[in-house]
């Protein structure tokens, strides 16, 4: 397959806001790809690389492409591009800079102008084509003629949409049925939807529910097979080396194999949660220092050779109690409304965010956000994308201050601006922003540094109002910064529909 066919499909997707049209364009090029080309094509159309990071950033790629005359006609094949990317990923050590430059020059020098733009965006992680993984998953299902739920489940369990696409196109639903949970391989976590109140969630879900503390911690997934343990973040990053205390606890559990879902939390001497950033700081270091993480588990996906994903939550909770009862998040099964309200108050009094209310009859929907799990917090919060920041004045002169905030476009387009705020920014956060934001700079003018959509911030707000000021038609009311979310990508930010759902009825 010519690489130009992939680039043309990407351009077609970027040129429409119609999800149906995006899926059709993507499905056509995926269906046309040869067996050896499917994996890289699906990865590229999802905006990613099979090789992961290549060690070539904007500076390197920009220096290479500057002055290169683009090819007049497309000749590059998918195989040739994939091979060059493999070579880039495998280049290290003495002389690697020169070898990397040579590979980039050879690749970009044979590319047309459109192909060069696509490659630069792909290699630097800045490909904006309006095709998030969810849209590409739909396209894989259509290309293979396989039910979407079957493809989605296989992708979530395998952790690889490109690999799932190969299986779907070669063996259809029968081959995808062979995908299952594999201990020591991360599973995309089940997610929760916001609820307005405890009573509202109970009315929606009925009496067969579990009400548990919602901790202000970092999501973890712990796998153990024999003596081998792995710990993953919510984005499936392996942090095993950074959390030796959690590894040690996992090895002490009375089982031979297990997969647990939960939260990790740094606590004060009084047993109250430390700031979220103190928990997250451990994920980037192999040294525990003075901060010790305490795991709290709320789900069990596998125990001693038995997969539990499709079992109701009530069965999974029983398994969790049997293997890690002392490490469970405080929870009540089938509480009365008064008991649920008291549990919510107890969670807030203990310094936690609120409660999770979960349907005890529901299976574990890996990678999905549905109504079976609902979260109730004391205030409205949204995870939004930082689109830019304005230079401050007065005591904030020389500091990047007022944030431009965007909500995720579920159709895969650019984030949609919904407001600004400078409230809640401590001096430490102002200093951090001023140092960090230029590393994500897209462009700037006299007043504002505009960023690539990479940083997610959690915003607390009193509500939302209709507004013509911003493209989304809504504006945040009394928005203030709670914290940055280094554990979340822009693809996990709240959608514009989630923002609009807070409008007064």
Image (spheres, rainbow, N blue to C red):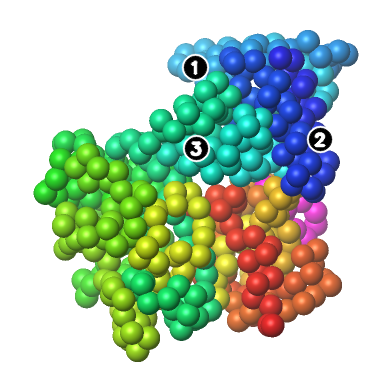
* Mark 2: few/some/many CA within 10 Å (<14, 14-19, 20+): some
Report if residue 448 lies within the magenta region.
yes
Is 192 located above or below residue 281 in the figure? Answer: below
Report if residue 385 lies within the magenta region.
no
Mark identifier at residue 472: none
Quadrant for the C terminus, please.
bottom right
Residue 442 figure quarter: top right
Mark identifier at residue 90: 1
Counting every numbered tag in the picture gives 3
Please report contact status of discs 3 and 2: CB closer than 8 Å, yes or no. no
Along the horizontal axis of the image, is 378 left or right of 127?
left
Closest to the camera, between mark 1 and mark 2, is 2
Residue drawn at (71%, 14%), measured in percent from left and top? 1
Q: Which residue is mark 2?
A: 12
Residue drawn at (37%, 77%), measured in percent from left and top? 207
Whether residue 463 is visible to the viewer of this picture, yes or no, is yes
Q: CA distance from mark 3 to mark 1?
A: 26 Å
Range covered by the magenta-colored residues: 444-452
Is 156 located above or below residue 215 in the figure? Answer: above
Q: CA distance from mark 3 to mark 2?
A: 25 Å
* Mark 3: few/some/many CA within 10 Å (<14, 14-19, 20+): many
Please report contact status of discs 3 and 1: CB closer than 8 Å, yes or no. no
Q: Earlier in the sequence, mark 3 or mark 1?
A: 1
Q: Position of residue 328 (x, y in %)?
A: 24, 63
Along the horizontal axis of the image, is 35 left or right of 406?
left
Q: Nearer the viewer, residue 107 or 295?
A: 295
Q: Nearer the viewer, residue 92 or 153?
A: 153
Q: Which residue is mark 3?
A: 155
Q: Nearer the viewer, residue 42 or 479?
A: 42
Whether residue 390 is visible to the viewer of this picture, yes or no, is no
């Amino acid at each position: 397959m010519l690489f130009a066919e992939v680039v043309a499909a990407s351009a077609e997707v970027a040129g429409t806001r119609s999800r149906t049209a995006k899926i059709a364009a993507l499905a056509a090029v995926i269906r046309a790809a040869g067996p050896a080309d499917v994996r890289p094509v699906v990865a590229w159309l999802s905006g990613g690389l099979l090789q992961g990071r290549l060690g070539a950033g904007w500076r390197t790629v920009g220096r290479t492409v500057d002055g290169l005359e683009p090819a007049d006609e497309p000749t590059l094949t998918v195989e040739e591009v994939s091979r060059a990317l493999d070579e880039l990923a495998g280049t290290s050590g003495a002389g690697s800079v020169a070898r990397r430059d040579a590979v980039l020059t050879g690749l970009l020098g044979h590319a047309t102008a459109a192909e060069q733009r696509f490659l630069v965006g792909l290699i630097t992680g800045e490909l904006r084509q309006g095709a998030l993984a969810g849209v590409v998953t739909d396209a894989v299902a259509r290309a293979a003629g396989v039910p979407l739920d079957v493809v989605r489940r296989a992708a979530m369990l395998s952790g690889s949409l490109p690999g799932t696409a190969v299986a779907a196109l070669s063996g259809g639903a029968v081959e995808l049925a062979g995908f299952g949970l594999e201990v020591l391989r991360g599973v995309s976590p089940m997610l929760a939807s916001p609820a307005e109140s405890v009573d509202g969630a109970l009315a929606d879900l009925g009496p067969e529910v579990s009400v548990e503390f919602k901790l202000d911690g970092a999501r973890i997934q712990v796998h153990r097979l024999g003596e081998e343990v792995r710990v993953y973040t919510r984005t499936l990053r392996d942090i095993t080396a950074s959390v030796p205390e959690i590894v040690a606890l996992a090895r002490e559990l009375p089982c031979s194999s297990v997969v647990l879902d939960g939260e990790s939390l740094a606590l004060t001497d009084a047993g109250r949660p430390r700031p979220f950033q103190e928990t997250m700081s451990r994920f980037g270091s192999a040294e525990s220092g003075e901060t010790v993480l305490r795991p709290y588990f709320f789900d069990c996906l596998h125990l001693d050779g038995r997969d539990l994903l499709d079992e109701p939550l009530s069965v999974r909770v029983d398994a969790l109690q049997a293997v890690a009862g002392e490490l469970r998040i405080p929870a009540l099964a089938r509480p009365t409304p008064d008991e649920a309200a008291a549990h919510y108050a107890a969670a807030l009094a203990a310094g936690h965010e609120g409660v999770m209310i979960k349907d005890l009859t529901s299976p574990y929907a890996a990678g999905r956000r549905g109504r079976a799990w609902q979260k109730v917090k004391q205030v409205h919060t949204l995870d939004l994308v930082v689109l830019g920041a304005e230079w401050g004045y007065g005591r904030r002169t020389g500091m990047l201050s007022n944030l431009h905030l965007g909500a995720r476009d579920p159709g895969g387009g650019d984030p949609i601006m919904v407001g600004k705020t400078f409230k809640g920014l401590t001096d430490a956060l102002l200093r951090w922003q001023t140092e960090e934001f230029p590393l994500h700079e897209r462009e700037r003018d006299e007043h504002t540094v505009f960023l690539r959509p990479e940083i997610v911030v959690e915003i607390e707000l009193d509500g939302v109002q209709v507004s013509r000021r911003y493209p989304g038609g809504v504006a945040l009311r009394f928005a203030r910064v709670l914290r940055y979310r280094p554990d979340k990508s822009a693809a996990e930010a709240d959608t514009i529909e989630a923002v609009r759902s807070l409008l007064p009825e």
